[in-house]
Amino acid sequence: MHESAEQVVMARYGRFARDEAPGRSALYEEWAMGVAAGGAAARTIARLPPTRRQPPLVFAVCRMLGAPETTFTEWSRWLQEHAEAVVAEASQRSLQTNEPLRCAALMPALSLIAGPIALLEIGASAGLCLVPDRYSYRYGGGTQLDPRAAASTVVLDCELVGRPALRMPEIVWRRGIDLQPLDASCADDRRFLSALVWPGEIGRSERVSGALDIAAREALVIDAGDATDAAVLRAAAASAPQHAMLVVTTPGVLPHIAHADRERLVETIRSMDAEWISIDPPRLLAQLAGATLDESWDRFVLSLNGEAMANVDPLGGYVEWRAGEVDAAR
């Protein structure tokens, strides 16, 4: 029997409450459990397009619009009072989690590439991962990296296992591509990105806010377009300076792209004169690279040109280097 939209929402929010929210956000766990029980909240969310019903997106839009961060009962009442605004806003938004801490996971791979670097990010959102050279890094074990001029106002702390050689990349050009670019200097976009931080994630709001300030000062260029279209990707890459090494990054974005589009995108990247750095689930990387990864690759995988380099936390808080000691740039 075909499930109704409300039943689909209830099941989805039940999985979220059971598998994703515990240990990360008690508030989101409570809200999701309430939606999973059915009723007015589930019916409102069912009005959204299927691609816009994700719990983190719906909850973020509600908080962006002023929802109280309190019990499910009070939140559900607020949702009914503001249903039209929530449906309208969530229908045009998408999950664009822009976590600058991912740069701490990208850094070991960036350190392998001799500069100068032209950095092109796919799925750039507001560009917080386009400015890795503007942050300071504090890795477990005492390794520290700072921008050449001075320590940054944004310090990224990362647990590090293994001893990759790390150095601050020389980035001379940067550009992004996103279906719906966000503007780090726009008040509405800043509120939305801040709302994508889950309640209970200590320190993350401050980190995102500081990174937004840095990105706003950079006046980043982020093209609105579909990077799975080879013409769009090649047009953006064509503006990179010829003396720089083009580095294409796809940190955490490939799982959100449909299979055929994803394969076309990777094929285009591989055909370019560029280095490719990605952060992906192990199974996805194995499919893309044709490699076999055993069960010890139990987190996301940092890869360089399809070669697995490190086990990493998808948001960048942990790096387990697996590629051996690296003493020199390629």
Image: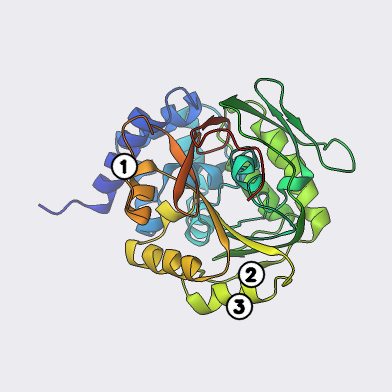
Reading the image, the residue beneath label 3 is: 235
Looking at the image, is 68 positioned above or below residue 178? above
Residue identifier under label 1 = 12
Is residue 191 among the parts visible in the rendering?
A: yes
Of label 2 and label 1, which has the lower sequence position?
Answer: 1
- Figure quadrant of residue 299: top left
Residue 65 visible, this angle = no
Q: How far apart are marks 2 and 1 (CA)?
A: 32 Å
Q: In this view, does 92 lie to the left or right of 40?
A: right
Q: Residue 313 at x, y = what percent?
A: 51, 34
Can you name the residue that lies furthest to the right here?
Answer: 149
Which of the marked residues, 1 or 3, is nearer the chain's N terminus? 1
Secondary structure, mark 1, is: helix
Q: Quadrant of residue 101?
A: top right
* Residue at screen point 27% across, 40% down: 11
| Residue type of the residue flagged with mark 3 | Ala
23, above or below 269, in the image: above
Position of residue 57 in the picture relative to residue 288 (left or right): right
